[in-house]
Amino acid sequence: MESPLDQLESALLSLDRVTVNRVLSEASASTLPLTRIESLIVPALERIGVGWEEGSVSLSQVYMSGRLCEEAVDAILPPSDDTRKSMPPMAIAALEDYHLLGLRIVYSTLRASGFSLRNYGRTDMNQLVDHIKTDGIRILLLSALMLPAALRIKALRSRLQAEGCVPLIVVGGAPFRFDEELWKEVGADAFGNTASDAISAISRLAGVLP
């Protein structure tokens, strides 16, 4: 018989919302919401991410799996719930890049894992700096598909330093996978190759914030 984790992964890949909700509901009698998220949803999304890297899962399946989990988590653990993971103010954005699928996948995966963060979507330099200052963002995730967008992050870092605002920056996207040293060159604090890498990166960075 399939384990709950196997059932959840299969349901997510087939976009079976009914089975996703059933598996999570059946686990609710004996586990706390965050335990369900950490023992079922996070590993299921990690498996799906590995499947994409190996070529057995499509990007659309990764994205829709994240969306289904995001819906499920909002039902299990509403955004206003005090037991959501306590983290410094965070946000995700695409800096002058029109390709948002990677951003949406990471955003959905993080929210499905119990994190709260703002989604600024596609934005330019001035807008992003204003958002960061207004919202007091301490950890900023930036997604880039095109190299010019990735290289703009270095200018963003300089601008933020000049403004006296120094959030920790996590980057991800194709340019950083092609050149594994690029994240350092643009002044980022961490690089995530997958959506699940972003979970590890922000958890680690949160531990070094004053």
Image (cartoon, rainbow, N blue to C red):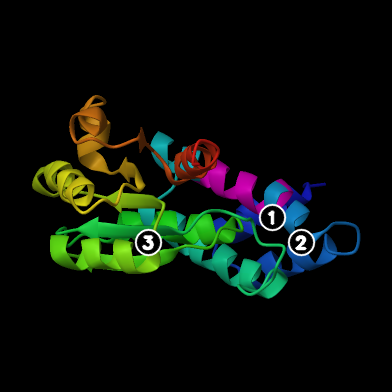
Which-is-in-front pick, marks 2 and 3? 2
Asked whether disc 1 touches disc 2, contact meaning CB atoms under 8 Å apart, the reply is: yes
Secondary structure beneath dot 3 equals helix
Q: Is residue 69 magenta?
A: no
Q: Amino acid at mark 3?
A: Arg
Comes first in the chain, label 2 or label 3: 2
Comes first in the chain, label 1 or label 3: 1
Span highlighted in magenta in the image: 39-48
Q: Amino acid at mark 2?
A: Pro
**Whole-Å distance between the Cαs marked 1 and 3?**
19 Å
Disc marking residue 37:
1
Disc marking residue 104:
3
**Whole-Å distance between the Cαs marked 1 and 2?**
6 Å
In the rendered view, would you say 80 is above or below 202?
below
Image quadrant of residue 73? bottom right
Depth check, front residue: 179 or 9:
179
The furthest residue to the left: 148
**Whole-Å distance between the Cαs marked 2 and 3?**
23 Å
Left/right placement of residue 137 relative to residue 205 reads left
**Tag 3: Cα neighbours inside 10 Å, few (<14), some, or many (≥20)?**
many
Give the labeled residue for mark 2: 33
Q: Amino acid at mark 1?
A: Ile
Asked whether disc 1 touches disc 3, contact meaning CB atoms under 8 Å apart, the reply is: no
Q: Is residue 40 magenta?
A: yes
Q: Position of residue 71 (x, y in %)?
A: 58, 72
Q: Position of residue 5 (x, y in %)?
A: 71, 48
